[in-house]
């Protein structure tokens, strides 16, 4: 029997405390299980935003989706995350990523490491966090023994190997990214290969690790052309007639989308579905269909 679906929404913007509280409470009301907070320049800082989201809600988990690891000292990050986990009553899910937008490093005055070095930094951070949170004498003490569940996002071999070694949740990015931040969307056969690769790396951990996917857009009947116009620049050549198959898109009626998500869970193992804030309301009718 498949594990129940989980649903997350990744928040990216706010103009005021009142708006942030309203959005977080709305996500909880709609039935989302996780509120994610992005980590990019130009949007709210993830650590204080996570704490505010936890304070505004009662049930949902609060996730960093995902932290740009090269920006952080792992020991200081452990302190921040343990504090939020403690103050939220154990509702933190910690998401880590390697960072990919060179302009953000340049703006922050931080050297932009090679891709390999950024992956190494994720591995080092994950190992440090695991070690600190496993220490029964560590302070501040996380609410849960061993600390929050760890999510690592990636697509390439090296980062997925790190995720397979350390993560409780592996978030498949659903395509490749360039240093400029451009995303190239993956087709089903590419997702098959990436999932098979990860399963090979997981070994005996395979049954205990959750798979996540970020859905970039939804197209209800009549909206296909609009989504195609937006996504075309990110598609491989000849893929415009395959929108319904792409793992990071949902196309059709709500009933068709729900059936497609069930099929993808069976095919790829994607049982934890995250959407962008812009699609929070639009995706919400799928939640009761899939409970």
Image (cartoon, grey):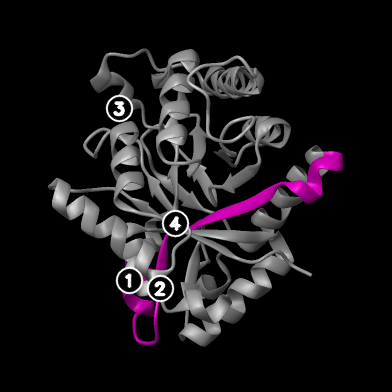
Residue behind mark 3: 104
Residue 59 in the image: state x and y as whole percent: 44, 56
Say what secondary structure mark 2 lies in.
Answer: loop
Q: Quadrant of the N terminus?
A: bottom right
Mark number for residue 59? 4
Relative side of 164 to 111, left or right: right
Query: How far apart, in angstroms, are the residues tagged by discs 3 and 2?
Result: 32 Å
The residue that mark 2 highlights is 284
Q: For the point 46% across and 86% down, which residue is it?
A: 253
Query: In front of the other: label 2 or label 4?
Result: 4
- Per the rendering, the mark at residue 125 is none
In three-dimensional space, the C-alpha distance between marks 4 and 1, rounded to whole angstroms, equals: 19 Å
Label 2 vs 4, first from the N-terminus: 4
x, y (%) of residue 264? 65, 68
Q: SS of the residue at dot 1?
A: helix
Question: Badge 1: how crowded within 10 Å, few (<14), some, or many (20+)?
Answer: few
Which of discs 4 and 3 lies nearer the camera? The answer is 4
Give the class, few, some or many, for how many residues have Cα within 10 Å of label 4's Cα (few <14, many ≥20): some
Residue drawn at x 61%, y 14% as measured from the top left: 137
Disc 1 designates what residue?
A: 281
User: In the rendered structure, which disc, 4 or 3, sits on the residue that comes first in sequence?
Assistant: 4
Q: Are marks 2 and 1 in contact (CB under 8 Å)?
A: yes
The span picked out in magenta is 203-230
Determine whether the residue tagged by mark 3 lies in a helix, strand or loop.
Answer: helix
Marks counted in the figure total 4
Which mark is first along the chain, 3 or 1?
A: 3
Instruction: Spot the residue most to the right.
Output: 204
Residue 66, percent from left and from top: 45, 38
Q: Earlier in the sequence, mark 4 or mark 1?
A: 4
The mark lying in front, picked from 3 and 2, is 2
């Amino acid at each position: 029997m498949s594990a129940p679906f989980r649903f997350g929404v990744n928040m990216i913007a706010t103009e005021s405390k009142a708006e942030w509280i309203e959005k977080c409470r709305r996500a909880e009301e709609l039935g989302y299980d996780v509120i994610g907070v992005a980590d990019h320049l130009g949007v709210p800082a993830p650590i204080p935003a996570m704490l505010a989201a936890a304070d505004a809600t009662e049930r949902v988990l609060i996730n960093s989706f995902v932290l740009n690891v090269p920006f952080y000292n792992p020991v200081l990050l452990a302190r921040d995350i343990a504090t939020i986990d403690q103050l939220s009553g154990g509702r933190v899910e910690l998401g880590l990523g390697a960072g990919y937008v060179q302009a953000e490093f340049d703006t922050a005055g931080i050297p932009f490491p090679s891709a390999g070095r950024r992956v190494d930094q994720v591995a080092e951070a994950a190992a440090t966090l695991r070690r600190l949170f496993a220490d029964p004498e560590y302070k501040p003490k996380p609410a849960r023994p061993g600390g929050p569940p760890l999510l690592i996002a990636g697509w390439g071999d090296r980062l997925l190997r790190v995720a397979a070694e350390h993560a409780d949740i592996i978030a498949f990015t659903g395509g490749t990214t360039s240093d400029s931040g451009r995303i190239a969307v993956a087709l089903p056969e590419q997702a098959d290969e990436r999932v098979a690769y990860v399963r090979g790396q997981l070994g005996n951990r395979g049954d205990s690790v959750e798979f996540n996917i970020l859905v970039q857009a939804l197209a209800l009947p009549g909206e296909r052309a609009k989504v195609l116009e937006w996504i075309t620049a990110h598609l491989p050549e000849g893929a415009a007639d395959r929108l319904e198959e792409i793992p990071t898109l949902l196309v059709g009626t709500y009933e068709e989308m729900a059936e497609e998500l069930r099929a993808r869970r069976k095919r790829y193992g994607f049982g934890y579905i995250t959407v962008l804030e812009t699609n929070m309301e639009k995706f919400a009718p799928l939640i009761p269909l899939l409970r």
